[in-house]
Image (cartoon, grey):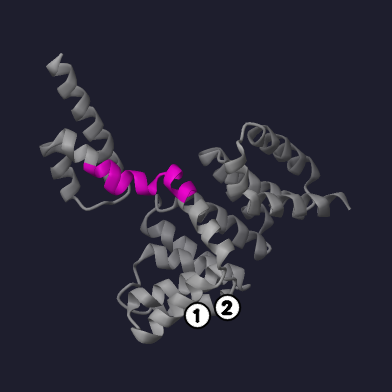
Amino acid sequence: MPILGLGLHVLVALFFAVHAIRTRQQMYWLLILFSFPLLGSIVYFFGIYMPNSRLEHGARKMVTAAARSLDPTRELREARAAFDFTPTAQNQMRLASALLEAGQAQEAASVYETCLQGAFSSDLDIRLGAARANLASGHAAQAISHLEQIRRSDVHFRAEQVSLTLAQALSESGRKDEARAEFDAAVTRFGSFDARAEYAIWAANEGETALANRLQAELQHIMDHWNRHTRDMNMPLIRRMNAAYDKLKR
């Protein structure tokens, strides 16, 4: 039995080691995981794996949405004040993110582009933010450039979000066939509600009735199994989807 327990610890450590390599974590994690399989795995789970999991992202999205509904401009006010008081790179990145979330995409894109000119030019989170801001402000070609550079740097980085944002940018650039292929790839690879919903919105807006109806049926099947909290968390996406289908029916 002790041998079995030791083997299980090693298998868990191996799982996290593979995750560390695929997500390009610091190599000292491998030393920790294999030197202390049980303790190392616990630390890695709470320190690295769980914060990047879908569950954590969902919880963070719910908390962020609740805070925004209570005081929509608070984060932007605080981010701008922090940058004005101490114009560090970290505060500049915070300001760019707050501007994007507040719907001020043009200014957000400008701040993100400035961030990429300095020591953080290789930061993929900043580059993804720049891509999203450029797309939202009507600069789809620039968004595509950023997203393609992310993929060249790390194909596993925020793979689903990169894929969906790229599909939207391709669509905005008039590259319909490439957009369809990217949406197809995202749904096939990730199979998430978000991927299907964004594909459905695109299909409805493009007048692809058969595809839109098929995706709508799949999405309704998923939503039928949701509880109220899950529905509330996804309500902004559901509203966008309903608006696209209303447009399709006209």
**Residue marked by disc 2:** 106
Q: Is residue 116 visible?
A: no
At x 23%, y 28%, the residue is 11
Mark 2, other Cα within 10 Å: few <14 / some 14–19 / many ≥20: some
Question: Vertically, is 220 above or below 241?
Answer: above
Question: Vertically, is 132 above or below 26?
Answer: below
| x and y, in percent, of residue 120 in the image | 33, 72
- Classified by dominant secondary structure, the portion drawn in magenta counts as helix
Indicate whether residue 45 is drawn in magenta: yes
Mark 1, other Cα within 10 Å: few <14 / some 14–19 / many ≥20: some
- Callout 2–callout 1 Cβ contact below 8 Å: yes
Indicate whether residue 135 is drawn in magenta: no
The single residue placed furthest to the left in the displayed view is 35
Residue placed most toward the observer, 121 or 46: 46
| x and y, in percent, of residue 207 in the image | 80, 51
Question: Cα distance, mark 2 to mark 1?
Answer: 6 Å
Helix, strand or loop under label 2? helix
For the record, the magenta segment spans: 43-59
Name the amino acid type tagged 1: Ser
**Residue marked by disc 1:** 110
Residue placed most toward the observer, 177 or 1: 1
